């Protein structure tokens, strides 16, 4: 009874005494095996983490049993690897054998077992870091590189093939944060390229067995790359200088050709420039009144207008006759403007190289023409002819405005002014038509393409057939067909074609004013100063044009012989009245001489009458 | 033009002749060169060792992959307590379990051990492949890998046999290696779940492939240590 009471009291004391002291004892908490590692696949160590000790001194013990064996062994070495560790030496270590390891924590109150862990030593190998890391700068070539070499950890036996290690390197500049990784495989040496000159590099290496964990990084090895930037920069300097030089050259070339480039890239748009021609009026009027719209009130320009601006590129050849039916072509020589009046930049003007004659001549000639026309039968055709004249004049003026003279060839041709289609289709009216018709050779520039094509398609041929034996034969060269071609794109074509040759020179007939029954076409050999047109019979060779060198004082057209002087002058009577006739007289003479000249002349393929100088008086 | 065609055809004929003749010579060289005559291009022992070691490394990587796949998808969270009772069928083969043991073993013994191991795995791997193909738990990649592994083990065994022949020819090892016709061990017929069996098989094979690799390396570094040791 007393015993049991004592026991109970003792038990109470034991139970409550600690509570009274504020502590509590308990069996130890469960320890845990944290990791087991083998540095060389020959020994291994296991570490554990103790649980709560329960307030009492606790002891830990590690027990293991091997695969296929029920014998339980205790850890042979608790000290070598430190606290809470167990070290298995070589004798106790078996590779390719499964270990089942358990840690037991024991204190006065009890013990607790950790969870068992199965390990196979071959899979827990974590070697030491590689040793003796050396980094050197190799400067054999122009671009230096780093050579990194190292030794495997001394504990790992790679020499006998027991362990196979692979290595990894990392490099970075001293001031950077990102490492550059390189896998080196099984080799113990590695090269690093692409270095920054003068940079300080840090290099580290680590290793890993084929089955296992990576080792720790070796201590960093520092290296400084020498400066080698001179070569690199000199190359860049050379490249820069060279490219700058080329750039300068290109700029200079560009500057030189700026204008032509500008024309190439942004070609100027040609605009219609017919002075006195009102587009709007043409658009607005009715079809029947088309022609009337072409008659502009202020055309031809008066003397007060600036002749400098007028360019007549066609020559209106008009040989006046007493008979109305006789008309000859006229050389309109007053309307050509000399070079130098190129003010217009219209590219549509092809007839570039005509020389211009005096503008006042042009104006006056027109006046005369008008008078002449009025003398003739006042037919509608005549009136229309006037209109055509006006048109021609318009063209002429246009040409005068923007001559594009080149080389002294005359662009100004007697404008082939077609007798209107209606004229040509009626042979019975031929007489009237022919006498009315004036031949105007328009330079191509005068031709708005397609505008007057219809006019010219018929005329020459019709006139041809109409011409009787007494007429001056005119032969339009083959080139004339080009003129008649609806498309008259270029200067050159038109120039060549507007040749009208008077072939019947040998007739000894009355010079054109007298004998011509119809419009006469004649080669203009020269225009004398008396404003006489010297015409020349057409030669079968087809060279219809002669180069007009100039007009002398007597209104004589000076034709140029190539390689020879061209001072054939002729006497003309100064009277305007007879200007029609006089040329004929002189023409005859001239023709012969011109013929002679012609034979000697080397005409261009197209043959031009180059009205080089302006005549002082308009030629009738 | 005909001249061009002719020259082109001549060049063509010459090229064909060169190719043909080179082939002939090479074939001829192979037929002549049977007894390590001078001038023949003979594979060195080191080269042979490198090849078999490479082959073995490949097998090992395959097994690692399969093992991890198995562990990840089919046995997650499986604790390893039950592993203790596992018993590989090759455990009867005496293999060195430490460096000293392996290094103290004779070359012939080591070679024999390797060959035994490789032979022991010929049938189980084939069965493993069959079971994986039938049970569509694995994806095709794993199934193909299993089949490949069986073939590769067979190839490796042939290769090691070649190496041992070469070594015997060179007098490095004696001719005491027994020719193995059939495996010494037989596969246990486990009644466990097929998955468990497969997993254990993979585990055992993974270990054995590591053994083979290690033994081969030891042999190489002992016999032809010039490179990689």
Image (cartoon, coloured by chain):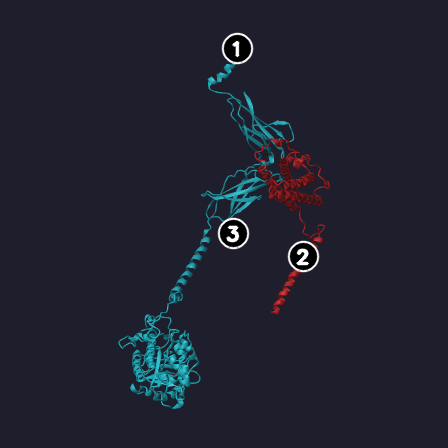
Letter of the chain in red: B
Hue used for the chain lettered A: cyan
Q: Quadrant of the N terminus of chain B?
A: bottom right
Residue A5: give its label. 1
State whether residue A580 is above or below residue A179: below
Residue B23 image label:
2
Q: Is residue A510 left or right of residue A224?
A: left
Q: Is residue A80 left or right of residue A584?
A: right
Helix, strand or loop under label 3: loop
Q: Position of residue A133 (x, y in %)?
A: 53, 41
Whether residue B147 is visible? yes
Which label's residue is closer to the chain start, 3 or 1?
Answer: 1
Secondary structure type for disc 2: helix
- Frontmost of labels 1 and 2 is 1
Q: Give the distance between the C-alpha atoms of the residues marked 1 and 2, in whole angstroms.
A: 109 Å
User: Within 10 angstroms of label 3, few (less than 14), some, or many (20 or more) residues?
Assistant: few
Classify residue B53 by image quadrant: top right
Dot 2, crowdedness within 10 Å: few (<14), some or many (≥20)? Answer: few
Q: Are marks 2 and 3 on the same chain?
A: no
Residues at marks 2 and 3 touching, judged by CB atoms closer than 8 Å: no
Image height of A176 relative to A579, above or below? above
Please name the residue shown 52% across and 26% down the image: A51
* Residue identifier under label 3: A141
Q: Chain of mark 2?
A: B
Nearer to us: label 3 or label 1:
1
Q: Nearer the viewer, mark 2 or mark 3?
A: 2
Q: Nearer the viewer, residue A454 or A359?
A: A454
Instruction: Determine the residue located farthest toward the top in the rendered image.
Output: A2
Alpha carbon of mark 2 to alpha carbon of mark 3: how far?
42 Å
Which image quarter is the C terminus of chain B in? top right
Instruction: Using the image, name the chain to which the residue with label 3 belongs.
Output: A
Q: Could you tell whether B73 is left or right of A16 in the image?
A: right
């Amino acid at each position: 009874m007393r015993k049991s009471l004592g026991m109970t009291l003792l038990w109470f004391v034991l139970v409550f005494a600690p509570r009274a002291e504020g502590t509590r004892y308990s069996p130890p908490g469960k320890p845990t095996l944290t990791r087991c590692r083998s540095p060389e696949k020959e020994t291994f160590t296991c570490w554990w983490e103790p649980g709560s000790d329960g307030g009492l001194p606790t002891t830990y013990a590690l027990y293991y049993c091997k695969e296929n064996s029920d014998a339980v062994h205790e850890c042979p070495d608790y000290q070598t690897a430190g606290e809470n560790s167990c070290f298995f030496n070589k004798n106790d270590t078996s590779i390719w054998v499964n270990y089942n390891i358990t840690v037991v924590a024991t204190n006065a109150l009890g013990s607790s077992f950790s969870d068992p862990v199965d390990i196979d030593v071959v899979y827990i190998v974590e070697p030491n870091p590689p040793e003796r890391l050396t980094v050197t700068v190799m400067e054999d070539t122009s671009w230096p590189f780093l050579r990194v070499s190292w030794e495997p950890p001394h504990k790992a036996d790679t020499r006998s093939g027991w362990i196979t290690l692979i290595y990894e390197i990392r490099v970075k500049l001293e001031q950077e944060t990102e490492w550059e990784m390189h896998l080196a495989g099984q080799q113990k040496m590695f090269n690093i390229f692409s270095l920054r000159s003068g940079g300080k590099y840090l290099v580290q290496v680590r290793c890993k067995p084929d089955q296992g964990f990576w080792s720790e990084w070796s201590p960093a090895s520092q290296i400084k790359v020498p400066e080698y930037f001179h070569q690199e920069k000199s190359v860049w300097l050379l490249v820069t200088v060279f490219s700058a030089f080329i750039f300068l050259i290109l700029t200079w070339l560009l500057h030189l050709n700026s204008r032509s480039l500008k024309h190439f890239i942004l070609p100027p748009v040609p605009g219609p420039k017919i002075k006195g021609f009102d587009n709007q009026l043409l658009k607005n009027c009715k079809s029947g009144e088309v022609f009337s719209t072409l008659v502009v009130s202020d055309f031809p320009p008066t003397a007060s207008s600036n002749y400098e601006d007028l360019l007549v590129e066609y020559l209106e050849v008009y040989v006046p006759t007493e008979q109305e039916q006789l008309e000859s072509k006229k050389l309109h020589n007053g309307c050509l403007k000399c070079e130098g009046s190129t003010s217009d930049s219209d590219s549509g003007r092809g007839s570039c190289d005509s020389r211009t004659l005096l503008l006042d001549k042009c104006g006056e000639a027109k006046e005369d023409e008008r008078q002449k026309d009025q003398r003739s039968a006042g037919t509608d055709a005549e009136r229309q002819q006037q209109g055509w004249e006006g048109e021609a004049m318009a063209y002429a003026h246009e040409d005068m405005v923007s001559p594009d003279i080149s080389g002294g060839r005359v662009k100004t041709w007697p404008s082939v002014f077609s007798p209107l289609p209606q004229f040509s289709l009626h042979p019975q009216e031929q007489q009237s038509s022919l006498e009315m018709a004036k031949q105007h050779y328009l330079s191509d520039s005068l031709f708005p393409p397609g505008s007057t094509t219809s006019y010219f398609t018929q005329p020459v041929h019709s006139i041809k057939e109409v011409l009787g034996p007494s007429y001056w034969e005119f032969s339009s060269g083959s080139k004339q067909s080009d003129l008649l071609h609806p498309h008259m794109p270029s200067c050159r074509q038109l120039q060549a074609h507007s040749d009208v040759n008077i072939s019947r020179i040998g007739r000894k007939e009355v010079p054109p004013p007298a004998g011509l029954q119809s419009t006469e076409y004649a080669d203009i050999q020269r225009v004398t100063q008396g404003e006489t047109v010297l015409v020349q019979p057409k030669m079968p060779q087809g060279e219809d044009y002669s180069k007009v060198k100039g007009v002398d004082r007597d209104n004589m057209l000076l034709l140029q012989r190539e390689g020879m002087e061209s001072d054939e002058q002729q006497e003309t009577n100064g009277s305007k009245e007879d200007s029609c006739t006089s040329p004929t007289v002189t023409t005859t003479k001239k023709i012969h001489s011109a013929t002679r000249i012609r034979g000697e002349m080397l005409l261009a393929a197209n043959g031009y009458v180059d009205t080089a100088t302006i005549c002082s008086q308009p030629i009738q | 033009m005909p001249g061009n065609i002719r020259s082109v055809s001549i060049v063509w004929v010459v090229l064909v002749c060169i190719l043909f003749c080179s082939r002939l010579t090479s074939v001829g060289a192979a037929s002549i060169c049977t007894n390590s005559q001078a001038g023949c291009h003979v594979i060195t022992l080191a080269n042979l060792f490198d090849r078999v070691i490479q082959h073995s490394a490949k097998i090992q990587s395959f097994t690692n992959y399969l093992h991890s796949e198995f562990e990840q998808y089919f046995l997650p969270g499986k604790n390893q307590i039950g592993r203790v009772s596992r018993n590989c069928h090759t455990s009867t083969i005496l293999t060195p379990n430490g460096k000293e043991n392996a290094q103290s073993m004779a070359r012939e013994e080591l070679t024999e051990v390797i060959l035994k191991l490789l032979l022991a795995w010929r049938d189980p791997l084939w069965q493993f492949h069959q079971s994986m193909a039938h049970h569509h738990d694995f994806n095709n990649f794993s199934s193909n890998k299993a089949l490949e592994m069986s073939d590769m083990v067979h190839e490796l065994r042939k290769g090691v046999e070649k190496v041992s022949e070469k070594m015997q020819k060179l007098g490095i090892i004696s001719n005491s290696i027994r020719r193995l016709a059939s495996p010494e061990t037989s596969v246990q017929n486990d009644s466990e779940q097929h998955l468990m069996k497969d997993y254990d098989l993979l585990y055992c094979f993974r270990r054995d492939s590591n053994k083979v690799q290690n033994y081969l390396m030891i042999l190489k570094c002992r016999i032809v240590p010039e490179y990689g040791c």
